[in-house]
Amino acid sequence: MAASRALRDFEPFCHLQPEHLTRLEEAAIIRKFPAHFHVFNQNDPFTGYLYLIREGTVEITLLTTGGEELVVDYRREGQHFGCTPIFSGEAYTGGARTARETECFLLPQQVIIAVCDAEPQLRQYFNNAIVARVRHLYADIVASHSQKALGRLEAYPFQKRLSEIMTAPVITCNENASARDVARQMHDHHIRSLVITDADGAMVGLVTCRDLISRVLSQSVDAEQISARTLMSHKPLALPPSTYMYEAMAFMIGHRIKHLPVVEAGHLLGMVTMTDLVRHRSQKALLMLGRIEEAQDLASLRELHDTLVQVADSLLSETRSAPEVMETLSYIHHGLIRRCFDLCRQQLAAEGLQEPDIRYCFLIMGSGGRREMLLGPDQDNGFIYEDFPDERQAEVDAYFIPLAQRITQALDFIGYPLCEGDVMVSNAAWRGRLHDWRQRIADWAANPEPHKVRYSSIFFDFTPLAGDASLAHSLQSIVFQAVREHPGFLYHVMQLNLTHRVPLGLWGRFITEKSGPNAGSLSLKKGGLIYIVDCVRMFALEHEVRALTTLERLKALTRDQVFSADTAEHIRVAFEALSFLRLRNEISLLREGEKPSSTIDPTSLSRTEQDLLRSAFQAVSKLQNATRSHFGKGLS
């Protein structure tokens, strides 16, 4: 059979005795995984199989202490992954994610061990493969994080590979299409380049906006008569997905190109532009983060926190999109909070308080977890511990309770107010072992009372900030499991979170507060942004999307065909518009010495801005209706 022939062609199985090869062939399972699928995650329990790639590409990933998932290796046809636990039975030391659609042989652990017992050279082969290739790569990454401030911060964007920032899937056009068809596709998809393919779907060229201008518009050529084949640059330069950002930037500058296809083994996987590369860097943020790392006391951190408004104003004036500014601000907030955390630990150590020898993770949640922090976020944080025995609870509490109290007080001093709902590490409800969290989350899902749903809406947007990030990754898997086991939970989330409608009445009139301090105003957050965040989160939970930001989740859901491209574009534009207006309003209030707020008087906006706000609210309303319809079916 085809599976038998394919298996015997791969190392090291081609060297086995016929009877042992046959045993493996009969036990092998063939399974296809879609593109960008997490086969397993770091610290997940062993699945019981060795994975041998029959066709496709798999990225091996590791988590940094900040929760960033870095691609450290690639496995291709004929190579295997998931080998480490075969003989140890331990959890996975790294993750495995498909770069494109991938087909694998799944070889059961018991059969492999039996064949290894009969043919020791096979065991030796796997032992050699296990020799800490991934561990060495991770050590290099960790070492880079121990460099001095700016050096370490500059490494952040350039440790990313093209597979992590590329746009996928790629919009393509057949080589026989007319120039008008090419221009229409670029316009419809808001792109400035188009990959041209032949009848077999293989990439043969690339057309850019410049090509259309120089070869069609400037020469008054009939756009229906000139073909994409005539317009295109033949055999465009491309790089593999494993290329680092700094390598791609040097390559593109050296060849004077702004559009770069990402290709692996002849397969077109994605597209990267020079704008993409530049977008992932922010010198102002890097320099400020460097100063944060050098801060030796809380007063210095407070001074740096007070300068955030200038950074935000500067970034927004550089015509950066509001989501880009939010993500940059979030990295600065993360840096401030992480440094505060470190200083609190140092204080306890100086006072003689010993840190227990356990794995733990400090989480931030809400807008901080989504990397969508603006200028006035409060505290939403928690602790996860490994599953230590009950008898160690007193020892753990003796350290982490004082640490938690120290952290919340210090953050409040720096400029992060205490959470009104007490969602903070100083509250025992937001500390616990993995199995404690499993019980809490299961209770939220099984008994979705309003206050529990509100807790979940804050908590489910979490990201690790310090400690062992793999604990947070395991916690995410627990969340997905709870949602799977209690499908009615998302219905209750929808019922609570979508109680109100956007502040837009008949004929597009804005509905403002009638009385009180905000009379004549409306909230951009409570009237629109929160609904986009909540709705997209619900779909992300249902489809087990691990992306953090709202727009990353939206992109993944569009790729998985949960949202159409048009619907996703309307949501994206609404999110960007509302975020821009809110950020600009916060900057203005802070400059006037007032507290940041999302409340604005819509009549203070220009006519164009009012139209933009109206359109954004209309898009949010459509999203609300679609979410109600989708999750309302769950209990019908």
Image (spheres, rainbow, N blue to C red):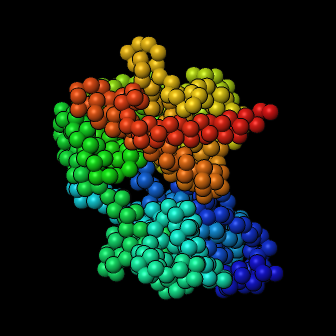
Instruction: Residue 265: give x, y in percent of width and height.
Output: 56, 80
The answer to whether residue 383 is above or below residue 224 is: above
Give the total of numbered labels: 0
The answer to whether residue 224 is above or below residue 558 is: below
Instruction: Spot the residue most to the top.
Output: 516
The answer to whether residue 296 is above or below residue 525 is: below
Instruction: Residue 95: give x, y in percent of width and height.
Output: 53, 59
Q: Quadrant of the N terminus?
A: bottom right
Quarter holding residue 635:
top right
Which residue corresponds to the image point at 66% horizontal and 83% vertical from the top-left?
199
- Residue 16 or residue 305, whichever sits in front: 305
Instruction: Residue 198: give x, y in percent of width and height.
Output: 62, 83
- Residue 560 or residue 292, whichever sits in front: 560
Instruction: Residue 633: give x, y in percent of width and height.
Output: 76, 37
- Residue 433 or residue 249, whichever sits in front: 249
Which residue corresponds to the image point at 28% horizontal and 52% vertical from the top-left?
318
Q: Is residue 551 visible?
A: yes
Which residue corresponds to the image point at 61% horizontal and 25% vertical from the top-left?
499
Q: Quadrant of the C terminus?
A: top right
Which residue corresponds to the image point at 41% horizontal and 78% vertical from the top-left?
218
Q: Is residue 122 visible?
A: no
- Residue 54 or residue 503, whichever sits in front: 503
Quarter holding residue 359:
top left
